[in-house]
Image: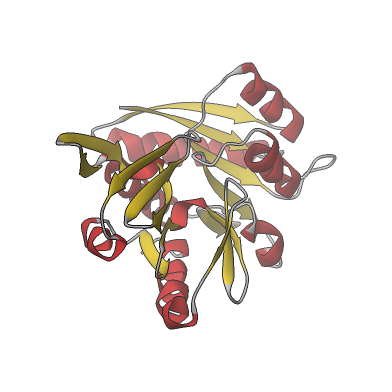
């Protein structure tokens, strides 16, 4: 597989350093990488709107004009792109609340270090390999397969399970949701008696609910809150 890597930073030295680390990392893997570099947020967004597909975007926050938070929000909300892995980079650490709704994969502090870049990329490749694996179910004696990474959440209704996909499609079959959770990897969490969510598609959460990338609000029951919070913490830390 060839990965499309984006680097968006107005410091040319940072871009050059990151590009070097990325190329070195992929040279050690069984994968190829094509690197795109932008020095302004506007030029990055222009190319994304033209159709350039980016798998992993290293995005600086402090820009003159449109900053990194605005760019990330545009990617998620306007372009409806939930699959791009965004890694924010900054000299400051006080962006946690602003970044949460953008659901970045990681946040790296400048000056950047080769070890942290490689560790982040290594975790991402592991996640992508997991996303390519398949969830299977049977409906009317037919076997169906769905890549894990395309499932946003699952809902149980009257002995039927609905699978909501990132494409907007809904698939349905007869079954019990408590049985299905055991078939799914750790990024899937049961948050209520009738719901399993994919942490990849959580854009925000409150004390007793989560908002999914599609805009759906799903309540988190009291009995599931502790496990949900621990799993979300582990997922956001790349464990």
Is residue 77 shown left or right of residue 218?
right
Using the image as rendered, state which of residue 81 and residue 11 is in the foreground.
81
Is residue 29 shown left or right of residue 152?
left
Is residue 51 shown left or right of residue 164?
right
Q: Residue shown at 44%/72% (left/top)? A: 228
Tell me residue 7's x, y (percent): 58, 36
Using the image as rendered, state which of residue 195 and residue 205 is in the foreground.
195
Q: Residue furthest top?
A: 50
Q: Residue furthest right?
A: 65
Tell me residue 158's x, y (percent): 37, 57
Asked if residue 110 is positioned above or below residue 145 in the image, the reply reads below
Asked if residue 105 is positioned above or below residue 30 in the image, the reply reads below
Q: Quadrant of the N terminus?
A: top left
The reply to whether residue 29 is in sight is: no
- Give the total of numbered labels: 0
Q: Quadrant of the C terminus?
A: bottom left
Which image quadrant is residue 226 in? Answer: bottom left
Tell me residue 215's x, y (percent): 62, 49
């Amino acid at each position: 597989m060839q990965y499309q890597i984006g680097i968006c930073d107005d410091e040319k030295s940072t871009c050059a350093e990151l590009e070097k680390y990325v190329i070195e990392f992929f040279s050690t893997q069984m994968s190829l990488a094509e690197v795109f570099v932008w020095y302004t947020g506007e030029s990055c967004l222009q190319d994304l709107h033209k159709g350039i597909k980016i798998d992993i975007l290293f995005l600086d926050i402090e820009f003159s004009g449109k900053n990194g938070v605005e760019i990330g929000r545009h990617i998620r909300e306007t372009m409806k792109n939930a699959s791009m892995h965004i890694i924010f980079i900054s000299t400051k650490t006080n962006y946690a609340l602003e970044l949460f709704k953008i659901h970045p994969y990681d946040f790296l502090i400048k000056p950047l270090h080769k070890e942290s870049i490689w560790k982040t990329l290594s975790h991402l490749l592991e996640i992508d390999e997991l996303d390519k694996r398949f969830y299977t179910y049977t409906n009317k004696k037919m076997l169906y397969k769905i890549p894990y990474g395309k499932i946003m959440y699952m809902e149980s209704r009257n002995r039927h399970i609905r699978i909501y996909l990132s494409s907007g499609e809904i698939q349905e079959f007869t079954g019990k949701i408590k049985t299905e959770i055991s078939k799914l990897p750790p990024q899937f969490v049961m948050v209520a008696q009738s719901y399993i969510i994919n942490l990849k598609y959580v854009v925000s959460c409150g004390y007793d609910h989560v908002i999914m990338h599609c805009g759906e609000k799903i309540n988190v029951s009291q009995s599931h809150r502790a496990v949900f919070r621990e799993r979300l913490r582990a997922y956001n830390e790349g464990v």
